[in-house]
Amino acid sequence: MKGEAKAIVLPKASKLRLQNTPYHIGNPGDVLIKTIASTITPGLDRLLLTNKPVSHKVLEYPIIPGSESIGQVVEAGPDARDVETGDFVYVFKGDRWSGVESYYGCHAELIPTSSENVLPLGRPPIHRDLLTGLLAYVISALDKVPIDPSMRVLILGLGSVGLMISEYLYKKGCLHVDAVETFGIRGQLSRAENIALEIGDFTAEFNNRYDLVIETTGRILMIEKAIRLMKHQAKVILMGNYEVMAYDYRLIQHKEPAIICSNITTFRHIQEASAILDTGELDTEKFFTNVFPVSQFEFAYRIALDSKEAIKTVISWV
């Protein structure tokens, strides 16, 4: 089946449009989702907007952004996995667009995709379901290190990723978590014990303190600045979106840190994240700082990318 849907499109760098975009769903496992809401991912979308490298994959405009949506199935192929027409779902990828590249491709009134890219909710969605991908990303990263409640953790940046890390570690019983965050209001929302506006604000008593450092800001040079705070052979997880990937190894080699890249989220992580959110154990309300109708999508992007108060900015499609 071919059709068109209104979608937020980047026709070129630094330009956003809401335009009719063609799609084609024709495989037996394909589904079409009527979108209820989607969220903006600031770090990733900033690179897409400014035509900076996002991954090893070379992208060409036009591009449809968006990787976190909730909606309802309006069409389902005969082999659609675990979903049928009328089901409510979480969607993390729309990949059946025509003539446009989808970098996840979920900012649209209708999302054409494979059923492999949706998670059945089994109930009407609520706004915390929009955090499924974010929490799954955190779970995926922390799966790469052994988590012990006694460990000391330093989070660099308390945007949506850093804030979710602090929530998840608190749930896991890790109470010795500190953070660096320029905007004080974000620090107040977190579970961190000690919060510095700059790394230099951590005095000498914090030297050689941390078993694990988690970088979420997208500024790779933060690793050099934080090296004095790390224990010998501390682990460093990279969770930001990096335009530049270069640091001076001479400045960190004496601590022999283990640098861990984390970018891949599997369906298992998404299922685990959804199950955790369903328990209500995490404080999710604080993540949602702005909701805008799709008619105000440009303003929504400005807020999401530039406002220090913004954590999760939601676009409503209904």
Image (spheres, rainbow, N blue to C red):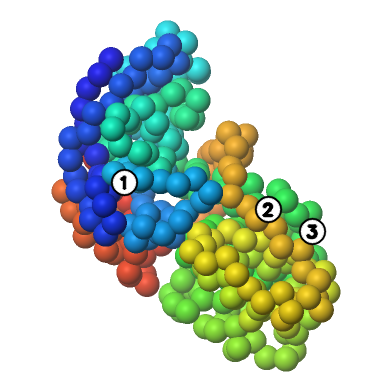
Q: Is residue 275 left or right of residue 317?
A: right
Q: Is residue 56 left or right of residue 227?
A: left
As drawn, 270 above or below 139: above
Instruction: Find residue 198 and report its horizontal and vertical position in percent.
Output: 55, 84
Mark 3 residue type: Asp
- Write down the residue under mark 1: 61
Mark 1 residue type: Tyr
- Write down the residue under mark 2: 142
Q: Quadrant of the C terminus?
A: top left
The numbered mark at residue 137 is: none
Of badges 3 and 1, nearer the viewer stands: 1
As drawn, 248 above or below 37: below
The Cα atoms of the two marked residues, 3 and 1, are separated by 44 Å
Secondary structure state at the residue bearing disc 3: loop
Q: Quadrant of the N terminus?
A: top left
Of badges 3 and 2, nearer the viewer stands: 2
- Write down the residue under mark 3: 148
Residue 316 can be seen in this image: no
Residue 96 can be seen in this image: yes
The Cα atoms of the two marked residues, 3 and 2, are separated by 11 Å
* Point 26% across, 52% down: residue: 12
Secondary structure state at the residue bearing disc 1: loop
The Cα atoms of the two marked residues, 1 and 2, are separated by 33 Å
Q: Which mark sits nearer the N-terminus, 3 or 1?
A: 1
Farthest bottom residue?
A: 204
Q: Residues within 10 Å of mark 2 (few under 14, many from 20)?
A: some
Residue closer to the observer: 309 or 226 = 226
